[in-house]
């Protein structure tokens, strides 16, 4: 019995370590899309915590600009996340789909980020933004 318990414990520890080492890295996938319906969709997001899909304007410099839309996301894998645009986006505009945290704000579930703020700011694993740039059609 003692051998069985030891073997079971070793198996559980190994399985947990395997799962942790093979966890999915944070990411966002999206493609160029028609925004005439007033939304932008990320086809897949993997988030290390609850947070936000944030749509920033950007340009050839590839720096995040003003926020033009956002949608809540949950920790783990999210599919087909649609953010409602809060201002007009024209065909040809470049947009940056970015994963933001829910941390640092005063209210949970309320998007509080403004450009450059720490509240509900972008996540940066290894110092890198989790984002994908697309073009509005």
Image: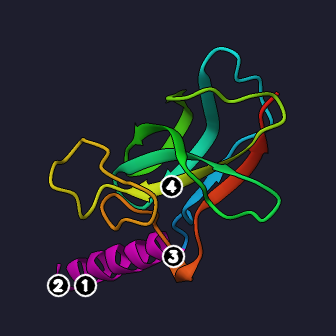
First to last magenta residue range:
1-21
Element type where label 3 sits in the image = helix
Q: Are marks 4 and 3 in contact (CB under 8 Å)?
A: no
Residue that numbered label 3 is attached to: 125
In which quadrant of the rendered image does the N terminus lie?
bottom left
Number of the label disc, if any, that sits on residue 6 = 1
N-term mark: 3 or 1 = 1
For the residues labelled 2 and 4, the Cα–Cα distance comes to 47 Å
Number of the label disc, if any, that sits on residue 2 = 2
Residue that numbered label 4 is attached to: 99
N-term mark: 4 or 3 = 4
For this orientation, the residue located farthest to the top is 37
CA neighbours of label 3 inside 10 A, class few (<14), some (14 to 19), many (20+): few
For the residues labelled 4 and 3, the Cα–Cα distance comes to 11 Å
- The label nearer to you, 3 versus 1, is 3
For the residues labelled 1 and 2, the Cα–Cα distance comes to 6 Å
Q: Is residue 64 left or right of residue 9?
A: right
For the residues labelled 3 and 1, the Cα–Cα distance comes to 36 Å
Location of residue 79 (image quadrant): top right
């Amino acid at each position: 019995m003692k051998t069985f318990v030891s073997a079971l414990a070793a198996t559980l520890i190994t399985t947990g370590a395997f799962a942790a080492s093979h966890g999915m890295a944070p990411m966002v996938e999206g493609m160029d899309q028609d925004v005439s319906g007033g939304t932008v969709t990320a086809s897949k997001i993997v988030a290390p915590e609850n947070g936000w899909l944030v749509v920033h304007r950007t340009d050839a410099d590839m720096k995040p600009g003003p926020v033009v839309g956002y949608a809540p996301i949950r920790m783990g894998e999210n599919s087909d996340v649609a953010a409602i645009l809060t201002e007009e986006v024209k065909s040809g505009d470049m947009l940056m789909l970015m994963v933001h945290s829910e941390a640092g704000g005063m209210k949970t579930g309320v998007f509080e980020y403004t450009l450059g703020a720490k509240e509900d700011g972008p996540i940066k694993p290894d110092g890198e933004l989790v984002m994908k740039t697309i073009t509005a059609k």
